[in-house]
Image (tube, helix red, strand yellow):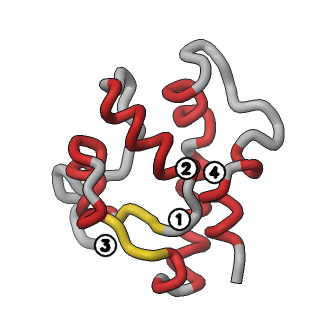
Amino acid sequence: MPPILPGSQRIVPLHPTQDELDHLRRMLDQGEWWVTRHAWRRYLRSGSSDCTVPIHRIGREQRVAAHAWVSQQRHALYRALEDPQGIAPEGWLESLPLAKALLSD
């Protein structure tokens, strides 16, 4: 397995800035594109579309992997965007356009 390079991990910041929150929200609320792993930190800082790829252009396996990451990060995303002390309620993630788009064919 290749080493994980600094900056290549896709994590939700513990204490996101307002810009990072805006970019996370936009990522979840749209259902048209996905942020590439190598551009994750750059996307959080800038929100640039140069860091994204249209969902319809990524393969099924990558969409499944992306959905798995979003599912694993559901509580961290919820805490960052909705309630710093909370956990994602049932159905919260599934209601988001990004989650729906990642599962569509």
In the image, residue 32 lies at what x, y percent? 53, 68
Q: Secondary structure at mark 2?
A: helix
Q: Residues within 10 Å of mark 4 (few under 14, many from 20)?
A: some
- Identify the amino acid type marked 2: Leu
Decide: is 82 above or below 59. above
- Foreground mark, 1 or 2? 2
Q: Residues within 10 Å of mark 3 (few under 14, many from 20)?
A: few
Question: Do residues under tags 1 and 2 come within 8 Å of each other at their CB atoms?
Answer: no
Q: CA distance from mark 4 to mark 2?
A: 12 Å
User: Residue 80 has which mark?
Assistant: none
In the image, residue 55 lies at what x, y percent? 51, 75
Return the residue at label 2. Answer: 28
From this viewpoint, which residue is outermost toward the top?
85
User: Residue 1 has which mark?
Assistant: 3
In the image, residue 89 lies at what x, y percent? 78, 31
Residue 30 placement, left or right of 36: right
User: Residue 66 has which mark?
Assistant: 1
Question: Do residues under tags 4 and 3 come within 8 Å of each other at their CB atoms?
Answer: no
In the foreground, 57 or 89: 57
User: Residue 71 has which mark?
Assistant: 4
Q: CA distance from mark 1 to mark 2?
A: 12 Å
* First along the sequence among labels 4 and 3: 3
Residue at 45% over, 76% down: 54
